[in-house]
Amino acid sequence: MKICVIRVFFVILQPQKVKSTSKNCFNTMNHYTRRSFTLVLAVLSVVTLMAHVPNYTNPVLPYDYSDPDVIRVGQTYLMTSSSFNNVPGLQLLASGDLVHWEIVDAAIRYRLPGYEEGDPVAGNFVWAPSIREHDGRLYIYYGDPDRGIYCIRSKPFDSRLPAIRFPLEWEEPVLVIAGKGLIDPCPLWDDDGHVWLVHALAGSRAGLKSVLLMAELTPDGLDVKTPGRIIFDGHEEHPTCEGPKLYKRNGYYYIMHPAGGVKTGWQVVQRSRNIYGPYERKVTLQQGRTTVNGPHQGAWVDTPEGEGFFLHFQDVGAAGRIVHMQPLKWVNGWPEMGKDGEPILMYKGTEEKGNTEPSWANFARRDEFDSTVLALDWQWSGGRIEPQWFFCDAPKSCLRLYSAPREQNDWMPNMLLQKIPATAFTAMARVRFVPLKDKKMLGAEHAGMIVTGRKASFKLEVPVTDEWCWLRLEMDEHQRGQYYIALERNGQKDPSEWNKAGEPFQAVAGYWTGAQVGFFCTRDKTINDAGWLDIDWFEIQITPSSHP
């Protein structure tokens, strides 16, 4: 029997300018209003039903949240994932039921730890994090394959409150273990006072893979006490073992990890009464007869009622690594995942009444740029955020991107991007390109919409007219895209005047990521000023009935 736990949230709601009259008013609120509405404690009380897990269809998040880790703090579930070279990094998602998620924070706000000007960034830096709550703080550990294992922890918060106040204050990152190829860390504060850290190796940097290591940390979790040593070699039975998560249950240490590779692998669970082993092991989840390839790296979490779930990702190519959730139950000291060890597509939980939208529909939204800061679903691709890249002009309800020089290998560090859904969708924007009026810069500045990936970027450049125009991207469920453009006349656009812009294209994945959509504004020359791209609004709409 499930129990509906009642939580009380207090919110501060301030009058906000809203242009759109969408039926889903929640999606049209600006970033701060939406975040306050869901998570901030203050004056006005809102009663919501929590703790139960409603009916859902996998994937619960058809977006690129690679290597997800999930915990529960009180009644709130928190998720983080790999963010690689994107900043803000280590986005933090919150949920009351494991199905409906909202971005609420980012632990890396402005610059990737260890980044120096000119460093190659694509696909590097923040790999496979784990998140834990200990002694009133959140701890996030992640591996930087070129630098070592980092820890970023929050300043103390009151975990007794009915909800965590976001955003949190985060301390400076600490390099816990320096070294190349140290990846996929996960800590455990043991009940005897020891602190353990399990991690894997990246063969591209360490020269060895398919092994798991265990190290002991100092009590604060910020330094290594004893060096790591190999506790499992998966070369024969479980090659490419990686992404371990460490737990303790009923006197056993459990390590849950994938093996066999991202696209064709399986989930392994190991257990031992000794932290250093030897461990016995069991395959607990594999593709079998289903269409869910992988299924790859993830995390175990339980509800307040003790119902277990395992969240993991599936690599679907250009749309990235999308998040699935499997029921998990314990039988004879081992977890059973999915149905007979295979992924499920549908789960019958608590009946949802009056909600016909998919659980992830709130991720497809309209941004009016009414705030003085960017919403957290926007990320910069260049490893850091520079103030000269943009201006959030809230009084004019506009985002201004200034042109920035390209870097080595023609890299545009100031691309402003969002994850694309693994569904058919339409992305639209109203924009205006105003290049610098200087003969030396004639034809040297470019701006527009972009879909970018590992091997190719597909751009729709805005005409140099200083006039407002409309951009549209149509993308099908196979990530095949087509751009359209419409020029304004007297402030209005006629849908019949949409013109195709360029040829159809096939989006491609990035370095360990899916393709991303957003904007660019760049220049080939540099003088003492820059032109800009104004963005009045941007929205993504999921095509009805489209589902991965």
Image (cartoon, rainbow, N blue to C red):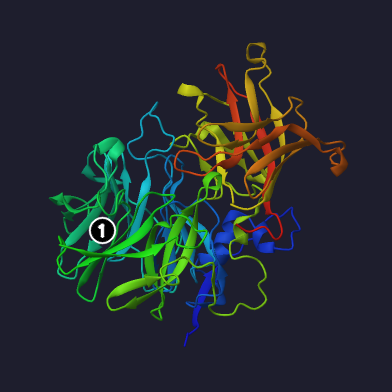
Q: From what the image shows, is residue 399 above or below residue 402? A: below
| Image quarter of residue 202 | top left
Residue sitting at the far top: 440
Name which residue type carries label 1. Pro
Q: Is residue 402 visible?
A: no
Residues 528 and 353: in front is: 353
Residues 174 and 503: in front is: 503
Residue sitting at the far bottom: 1
Image point (42%, 51%), residue name: 264
Give how far across and how far down residue 361 sits, in percent: 62, 61
Q: Crowding at label 1, few (<14), some or many (≥20) Cα neighbours within 10 Å?
A: many
Image point (50%, 35%), residue name: 454
Give how far across and how far down residue 411 sits, in percent: 50, 27
Residue sitting at the far left: 226
Q: Judge from the rendering whether residue 481 lies leftward or rightward of residue 236; answer left or right.
A: right
Residues 466 and 139: in front is: 139
Q: Judge from the rendering whether residue 46 lies leftward or rightward of residue 177; answer left or right.
A: right
Q: Judge from the rendering whether residue 206 lies leftward or rightward of residue 115; answer left or right.
A: left
Q: Is residue 401 visible?
A: yes
Q: How many marks?
A: 1
Give how far across and how far down residue 404 sits, in percent: 55, 26
| Image quarter of residue 534 | top right
| Image quarter of residue 526 | top right
Give how far across and how far down residue 238 sits, in percent: 29, 54
Give the residue number, with chain letter if any, for mark 1: 187
Image point (18%, 71%), residue name: 191
- Helix, strand or loop at label 1? It is strand
Q: From what the image shows, is residue 483 above or below residue 323? A: above
Classify the position of the C terminus by image quarter.
Answer: bottom right
Image point (38%, 58%), residue name: 266
Residues 387 and 280: in front is: 280
